[in-house]
Amino acid sequence: MSKQLWNKGFQPNDIIEAFTVGQDRELDLRLARYDVQGSIAHIKMLTSIGLLTQEELDILLPALQQIADEIERGEFVIEDGVEDVHSQVEFLLTARLGDVGKKIHSGRSRNDQVLVDLKLFFRDELKNIAHAVDRLFRRLQQLSEQHKDKLMPGYTHLQVAMPSSFGLWFGAYAEALTDDMQLVKAAYNIANQNPLGSAAGYGSSFPLDREMTTTLLGFENPHYNVVAAQMSRGKTERALAVAVAAVASTLGRFAMDVCMWMCNNFGFIKFPDELTTGSSIMPHKKNPDVFEIMRGKCNRLQAVPNELTILTANLPLGYNRDLQLMKDIVFPATTELIDCLDTADFMLQHIEVKDHILDDSRYDYIFTVEDVNRLVLEGVPFRDAYRQVGMAVQKGEYKPTREVHHTHLGSIGNPANDRVAEKMDKLMEGFN
């Protein structure tokens, strides 16, 4: 038996109902706490403008808090025949309180009710992503400081190029995450606007106090124009998807590096046996499956903005049911990204870094630039110094000094991790 709030006396076809509802009931459970939060703010506002009495508010608030407590205990379910979380909350109130439960929807459409739930949910998810990024950032910075004096090869075109260090390698990915955090913060700012009161997208004839609900829900400001508020559905998700893809791009690239550096041909890093996997046929294998799965998941997450763009590319103005399908894409994406970030942080707690890598003769030519620069500092013109070292290489006479003197900002000897940390600290302040 269907219990749609919009029921007009006829029963929808079961096939049509199943097709249009899709996975909404399962996905909506993640919105339940936010639906109650939005409803509490809404009925307080309705009381302030005279659409609810104080006595009715005093009845509704404890009942909504009871539902909120049931949600936190994991006892809240969307019953068979109930279309979504919004319907379930209202049906519970009506079943427990009678007609007063039916009054909470005055001045609202399910369009702005869904949208405020999503904005609150996305705001929290972006905070969770930001904190997960920050945890990994701090881990990378700690490793950068710990291993800043351990040299490793730097590559261009995957050919040995110049000396680098583990301090630079770990620190590079830490700073790259600060760029990604700019996009996470931008998406958070877009989500942090109140659409409640826009109703079906064209406002209401009730004298709604949208500034009040903005304050009660902790939004930075309202979406002022009611049409713009509804247009933000899709835009908010795309901004979040771009942020997710940016973080995933950095993490996926780091995972690729780890897979390479673990390879026997490099052998720069390793992990304890219990954090690797083996082969069913080759007893010597220690495979980087965690980072291979991470790389694959991060590559898949980078497709999320494209999925959303295609889904919303040709939609007309106003709400369209296609927008419901964005939840199927975005909800799993935020969960998967946080899982990848936390797994990377866990793995890096156990990373082992090889020392004295550049002592191997295969890396002799990595010091050619160092020796060219040494000659220049001694007064030899750069082109002459370049030719002198180059000819020694060609004749097989080159003998590296194996000395590295990098002191400028952001170099091997001065990775500027404290300055990078200041950038991240400033970004994280924006989520408080």
Image (spheres, rainbow, N blue to C red):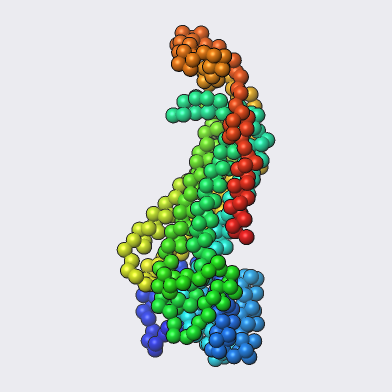
Residue at x 55% of width, y 63% of height: 123
Q: Quadrant of residue 269?
A: top right
On screen, 361 above or below 167?
above
Query: How many numbered marks does the figure carry?
Result: 0
184 in relation to 261, above or below: below
Judge whether residue 16 can be spotted in this image: yes
Query: What is the x, y in percent for residue 101?
Result: 56, 87
Quadrant position of the C terminus in the picture: bottom right
**Which quadrant, please, contains the N terminus?**
bottom left
Name which residue lies at 50% across and 53% down.
183
Front in this rendered view, residue 20 or 305: 305
Q: Position of residue 85 (x, y in %)?
A: 51, 75
The residue positioned farthest toward the right in the image shown = 146
Q: Is residue 244 visible?
A: no
Above or below for 46 versus 18: below
Question: What residue do we see at 52% from left, 47% from top?
Answer: 179
In front of the other: 68 or 77? 68
Nearest to the observer: residue 283 or residue 386? 386
Q: What x and y, as percent, mark residue 131? A: 61, 54
Q: Is residue 157 left or right of residue 50?
A: left
Q: Residue at x 61, y 19 (%)?
A: 403
Asked if 286 appears above or below 384 in the picture, the reply is: below
Q: Position of residue 218 (x, y in %)?
A: 59, 69
